[in-house]
Image: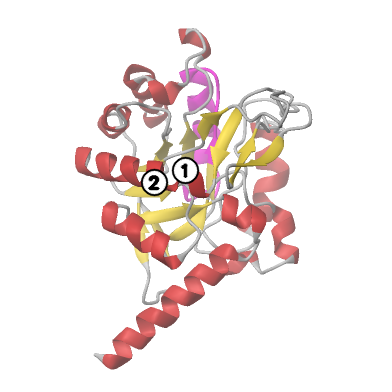
Amino acid sequence: MSGPLTVTVGGVSLRAPVLPASGTLGLGHNRVFDLGLLPALVPKTVMPTAREGHPAPRLVEAAGGIVNAIGIPSGGITTFIAQDLPRWTAFGPPVIVSVSAGTPDEFAAMVEALSATEVAAVELNLSCPNLEEGGKAFALDPHAVASAVGACSKVATVPLWAKLTPNAQEPAEPARAAADTGAAALIAGNTLLAFPRDAAGAPVLANRTGGLSGPPLYPVALRHVDEIARATPLPVIGCGGVRTLGNVKAMMAAGASAVSVGSATLQRPTAMIDLIAQWEAEAMTRAAAE
């Protein structure tokens, strides 16, 4: 279905350039609103094999945002494809599956398996530690990014979206590495490493550190969108602290082709639906006045 906000980003047609950030939308949201109304569906990141994630407590509000140390619990790629993916695709919008792994070969194996399904694109969540390079996150190292994206490009028959990190000091370098090795779009970015403590100074997360998201991350995300958009020709999806239509427009002005909404959905499940409705109403009003 086309409309005033329809765009094509990274090989995927979207009825509006607003989509979920991975990890913040679940099948249970369909009890609150029709998931078929969203421009795209992005399930929680899938791992190669089953894992439980980090112990509780693993989520806390801090500095006006949210710090999470969920640890990517997952049933594994085989279970996801057999049991979960059919439920997601049944809603209608394009499904972009987020995957993460510890080695390039594990990334590639998941991409190859998903390429045989109905997914519209695969998001490579490059924030996980590269187990072959001493545990440093893939997205912090341009060579590791190139290795992972390149391995996936050899087996992919669907577009690859590379999800980068705001923890990178020079975000243009891993962005160029992803662009040069086969990514169709870049997501800027993910959460910012943080260490929340209580009033007595004790850690409040069982994992000690976690990822900061929400409004405090917004100006950081804007900087990364700007630098990455100027560094590569690929479409950039801005992610970090987006809550209002003004935030969306600022991301687009900085160079984003679309935006991902995450923490706002955790705090107000209809956040994306509301943003799209406001934007569409504004676009139609403007068109009627011209």
Quarter of the view holding residue 110: top right
Residue 80 % position (x, y): 68, 39
Q: Residue at x 28, y 52 (%)?
A: 254
35 sits to left or right of 226: right
Residue 135 % position (x, y): 52, 12
Q: How many marks?
A: 2
- Is disc 1 placed on a helix, strand or loop? helix
From this view, report whether residue 158 is shown above or below residue 207. Answer: below
59 sits to left or right of 256: right
Q: Which residue is mark 2?
A: 219
Residue 230 % position (x, y): 20, 42
Q: Residue furthest bottom?
A: 289
From this view, report whether residue 248 is shown above or below residue 70. Answer: below
Whether residue 159 is visible, yes or no, is no
From this view, report whether residue 104 is shown above or below residue 32. Answer: above
- Is disc 2 placed on a helix, strand or loop? helix
* The C terminus: image quadrant: bottom left
Q: Residue at x 55, y 24 (%)?
A: 101
Cα–Cα span, label 1 and label 2: 6 Å
Residue extent of the magenta highlight: 98-121
Viewer-proximal residue among 63 and 40: 63
In the rendered image, residue 110 lying in the magenta stretch gets the answer: yes
Q: Amino acid at mark 2?
A: Pro
Q: Which dot marks residue 217?
A: 1
Disc 1 crowd rating (10 Å Cα; few below 14, some 14-19, many 20+) is many
In the rendered image, residue 159 lying in the magenta stretch gets the answer: no
Whether residue 176 is visible, yes or no, is yes
- Say whether marks 1 and 2 touch (CB < 8 Å): yes
Quarter of the view holding residue 98: top right
Q: Residue at x 41, y 59 (%)?
A: 247
Residue 2 % position (x, y): 40, 74
